[in-house]
Amino acid sequence: MKNLWIALLLPICMFSQNNLLDEIDDIKEDTKTMSAFKSLKIVNFESTKLVGKGDLFFVVAHRFDYIKNGFEDFFGIDDAVTQIKFAYGLTDGVTVHASRSGFQKTYDFAVKYRLMSQDSNGFPFTIVGFNSVAINSEMKKQFYPLLEFKHRLTYVSQLLISRKLNDKFSLELAPTFFHENVVRDILDSSNNVILPNPQDNNQFALGIGGRYKLAKRWSLNMDYGAHLNRASQSIYKNPLSVGVDLETGGHVFQMHFTNARAMHESGFLGQTTGDWSKGEISFGFNLVRVF
């Protein structure tokens, strides 16, 4: 675990950040830096965008229940999971955030930092580091008699690598490592707990996402996470999300469909249960307001 904490304190390189609405369409003449995304997230995955120095972003995110039940629960709208997040720019190249989510009553703290920037006449990618720690406050002592605070923790380390291919199209890869101090029980066909748990605490994933500009303030976004060492007996699925972004002044409004109801990294990568083929799809949105 020690080396995971060290990962949270990696050296940080600082570069410039552009205006919320202008940065993706323009190239700064002095630095020729190109930005691939307008919002902090593609859909579920973090993008390579950072908050400008001294700016405060307020994010409200919802994931409703699966649409497959139709009018019984009004296509899932009767049951929502909500996340509230604040993201602050310590510098133009360093963003910190804190959030609280209804999924497992999770608190999430993270740092996001730019390592390299895509240059129109130089380096071809933007590279950003992301490290977070999530605290599952839903776990109760009465159900886990030996529960200690450390058992609530999950750590995530990501390298976000994006490229703006042209004025309309941007792509990102996100190799990811996450460590769950406690992994969920896995049941066999008779609903008996499999012991020892076949799921490793150390888990690996590869995220891929992209943005295609449809109009001046509209874009089509998609991301997908491939879990690379999930136990074969696990019920969990890979998260797939598709949606659109709408930019309006100081807001970015993201609307999407996804099979993941969790909104923090270890949650949607490790504990997504929805199956697109069975209609287990949630409507959701992220509303971003900059101050």
Image (cartoon, helix red, strand yellow):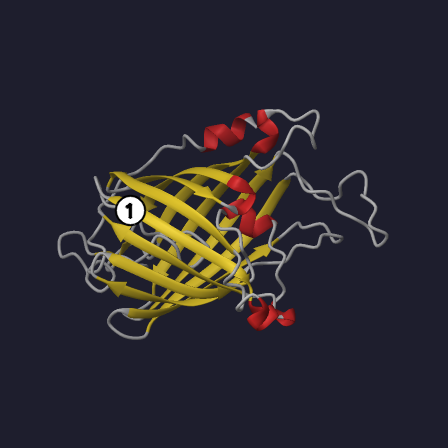
Which residue is at the far front?
72
| Category of crowding for the residue at label 1, using alpha-carbon neighbours closer than 10 angstroms: few (below 14), some (14–19), many (at least 20) | many
What residue is shown with label 1? 57
Tell me which corner region of the image, top left, top right, bottom left or bottom right, holds residue 256. bottom left
Describe residue 197's horizontal placement relative to residue 257 as left or right. right
- Above or below for 160 versus 3: below
Q: In the rendered view of the protein, which quadrant contains the N terminus?
A: top right
When the figure is inspected, residue 53 is found, relative to residue 253, above or below; the finding is above
Viewer-nearest residue: 138 or 181: 138
Tag 1: amino acid: Phe
**Residue positioned 44% across, 55% down in the render:** 62
Q: Give the quarter of the image for residue 198.
A: top right
User: Farthest residue toward the bottom?
Assistant: 214
Which residue: 56% across, 68% down?
67
Residue 249 in which image quadrant: bottom left
The percent position of residue 122, horizontal first and vertical second, equals 26, 55
Is residue 11 rendered to the left or right of residue 29? right
Q: Judge whether residue 241 can be spotted in this image.
A: no
Residue 23 x %, y %: 22, 58
